[in-house]
Structures are given as structure tokens and as C-alpha cells.
Image (cartoon, rainbow, N blue to C red):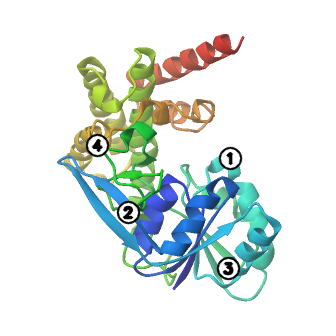
């Protein structure tokens, strides 16, 4: 099968391309700032990932059929449209603020009689429904849940992580996590390999809430509070913040999920929360607080992980006291940035 991945960043390479490479011919599209990386990847047809479990780091070679396209040049955009027009599957991993523009740029090649499957890999609820008007009726927009944490390593970490290939200045650290769920009713008959997990609509909605409020919400909780204390890495977060994060997870978010979803099993969700917090603080992934507070303005938008999470918990009849503290912490960080600029 043929697939196009629009967005060759940490998630695009560290999760999507790694998952899809065995079963799909891949076209990776991104802007000119990634020219060197994409050009070399197309030449080598493989790259290395640093897969970080709680026990250590495993270097994994990702090999496949890779073509590279620079979508911000006229020639590259024309090539991207050509690849999209014949692809079995198109995946976007460009961030919510860029999604509408990206979809509009390829909509013109989706006007034939064949069905076009477009998988939206950005954070958010019901993105497929929100962006349905961007593409013609032949396109089937599909939501997913991207829960693997991926990041490009900092330059000072070159002794810790293997580069993408010998001589590369880039290294990708990803966590050991493979679950990639899809709504089985929506994707029935679609070009989805076995790396995707087809689940019921009810279970898919459960995983959407787990991702946005338990995963993203608690990640932001830890990052915001740690940043205000001058902490730079998740593995260095002090015990008081870790304990508070666990309290917020088990007393506010998990009970809200259980009250909202009849299909949720208490033991399973509580166990997932415990493991999730261990993943946050994994010293081998060595995640940065800076990544956790990136895009705070967007995270404070109505319905997003912070305010939306408070509303979600409150609708379940639980006071989101701890969860709401993230909102105040985020606003303090933004206010501090404005003061610094002045």
C-alpha cells in the first residue's frame, strides 16, 4: 500500500513512519527547514530510533521505502498532490493550527470517484467532523489517538542517543509504546494495516478522553508546576509534584473517566494512570519540561486539555481543584513571558 505522511517531525518519524514502514510505501512531506533530513532519509532508506523503555534504551533500525517532498516549494507541492491523489492513506501530523491549511492544499486532487482515506493525527476531539468541509465527499476523515511520546534529542545528549544515521546531527528518542487505536466502524474496509487497532466507537471515545485529559492534562500539570520551580527535565521533578500529580489523576481524572464511560474498567484505568506517570518520569526518555509547556496559549483554549479537562471533571460531579491549578500555573508562566518581553 501507499501512504503519505504530511509532517515529518518527531511524531511523524518517531511513531507514524516507524509503525507504517513495514507495510506501506511512504512519502514524507514537510517544509524546507527539514530539507537536509528528508533528502538524506530518501537516499539512505532507513533511520535509527532510540526506543526508551523504563529499563533502558534500545536502538531500532527503521527501514522501508521512503520518498521525500518539500511541500513549501511549487515543485514540492505539485509532487505532494500527485502522491496524495494515488495514495491509499494520507496521514497528517502538523498540529491543529496548521491542519486546515494543509487539508486545503491537497483538496483539489480528491475530486475523482475513488475514496480517499485521511487520518488526522493531531490532538483534539472530533477533528474529522470539524474539518469535514475542507475536503470533498470522496474523502473519509478519520480521527486517531497518538499516545507515544517522541522528541528530538538536544545537542548535549549526543553521547546518550544514537543519531538518525552516522554523521547526522539529529537523534530521535521515543518511548516504548505501540497502541494506535481507530474507530472500527469508521475505518471498516479502509487501507489500514495490522499496526492499527480497531476498537468499538465507545472504546475509541474512551481513549480520546484518556489521551487528552489523563495523558495531555497530567503532562501539562507536571510541566507547568515544575517549570515554576525551575525544573528542566521530567525525571528531575521533585516528589511533592509527583505525588500531587498522582492525587489529581486518581481522585479527579480517573473517577471522571469512569463516570463518563460505561465501558471503562476501574482497575484498568487506574493501572494505566500509574504506568502513565512512570512513563512521564522515565529517565531514559529524559523528557524536557520545555516540551511540556510548549504552546500554552493553545492548551488554554476553550475545550482544550486544560479548560476542557476542568469542564469534563466537573460534568462528572467532581470538583477539579487540583486539575484547575494547571490553568493558574500556565497563566503565571505566560504572564512571566510577557513581563520578560516588556
Which one is nearer the viewer's eye here, 54 or 69? 69
Q: How far apart are the alpha carbons under marks 1 and 4?
A: 27 Å
Q: Residues within 10 Å of mark 4 (few under 14, many from 20)?
A: many
Secondary structure beneath disc 4?
helix
Question: Is 326 situated left or right of 75 in this image?
Answer: left
Task: Identify which residue is drawn at 50% across, 84% down.
Answer: 189
* Residue 186 visible within the image: no
N-terminal of the pair, mark 2 or mark 3, is 2
Return the x and y of residue 196 as percentages of the image width and height: 40, 71
Contact (Cβ within 8 Å) of mark 2 with mark 4:
no
Q: How far apart are the alpha carbons under marks 3 and 4?
A: 37 Å
* Residue 248: quadrant of the picture: top left
* Residue 334: quadrant of the picture: top right
Q: Nearer the viewer, mark 2 or mark 4?
A: 2
Q: Residue furthest front?
A: 167
What residue is disc 2 on?
48
Question: Is 54 situated left or right of 10 in this image?
Answer: left
N-terminal of the pair, mark 3 or mark 4, is 3
Amino acid at each position: 500500500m501507499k501512504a503519505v505522511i504530511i509532517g515529518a517531525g518527531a511524531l511523524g518519524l518517531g511513531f507514524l513512519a516507524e509503525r507504517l514502514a513495514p507495510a506501506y510505501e511512504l512519502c514524507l512531506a514537510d517544509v524546507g527547514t527539514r530539507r537536509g533530513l528528508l533528502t538524506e532519509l530518501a537516499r539512505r532508506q532507513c533511520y535509527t530510533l532510540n526506543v526508551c523503555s523504563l529499563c533502558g534504551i534500545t536502538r531500532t533500525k527503521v527501514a522501508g521505502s521512503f520518498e521525500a517532498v518539500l511541500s513549501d516549494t511549487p515543485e514540492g507541492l505539485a509532487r505532494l498532490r500527485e502522491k496524495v491523489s494515488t495514495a491509499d492513506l494520507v496521514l497528517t501530523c502538523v498540529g491543529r493550527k496548521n491542519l486546515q491549511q494543509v487539508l486545503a492544499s491537497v483538496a483539489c486532487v480528491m475530486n475523482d470517484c475513488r475514496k480517499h482515506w485521511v487520518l488526522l493525527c493531531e490532538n483534539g476531539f472530533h477533528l474529522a467532523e470539524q474539518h469535514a468541509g475542507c475536503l470533498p465527499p470522496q474523502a473519509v476523515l478519520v480521527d486517531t489517538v497518538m499516545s507515544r511520546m517522541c522528541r528530538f534529542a538536544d545537542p548535549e545528549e549526543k553521547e546518550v542517543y544514537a543519531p538518525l544515521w552516522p554523521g547526522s546531527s539529529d537523534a530521535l528518542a521515543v518511548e516504548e509504546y505501540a497502541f494506535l487505536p481507530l474507530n472500527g466502524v469508521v475505518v471498516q474496509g479502509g487501507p489500514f494495516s495490522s499496526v492499527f487497532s480497531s476498537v468499538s466507537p465507545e472504546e475509541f471515545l474512551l481513549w480520546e478522553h484518556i489521551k487528552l485529559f489523563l495523558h495531555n492534562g497530567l503532562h501539562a500539570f507536571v510541566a507547568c508546576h515544575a517549570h515554576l520551580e525551575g525544573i528542566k527535565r521530567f525525571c528531575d521533578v521533585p516528589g511533592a509534584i509527583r505525588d500531587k500529580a498522582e492525587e489529581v489523576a486518581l481522585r479527579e481524572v480517573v473517577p471522571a473517566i469512569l463516570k463518563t464511560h460505561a465501558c471503562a474498567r476501574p482497575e484498568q484505568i487506574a493501572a494505566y494512570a500509574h504506568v502513565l506517570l512512570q512513563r512521564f518520569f522515565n529517565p531514559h526518555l529524559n523528557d524536557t519540561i520545555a516540551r511540556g509547556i510548549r504552546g500554552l496559549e493553545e492548551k488554554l483554549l476553550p475545550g482544550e486539555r486544560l479548560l476542557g479537562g476542568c469542564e469534563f471533571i466537573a460534568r462528572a460531579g467532581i470538583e477539579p481543584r487540583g486539575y484547575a491549578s494547571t490553568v493558574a500555573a500556565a497563566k503565571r508562566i505566560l504572564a512571566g513571558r510577557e513581563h520578560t518581553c516588556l
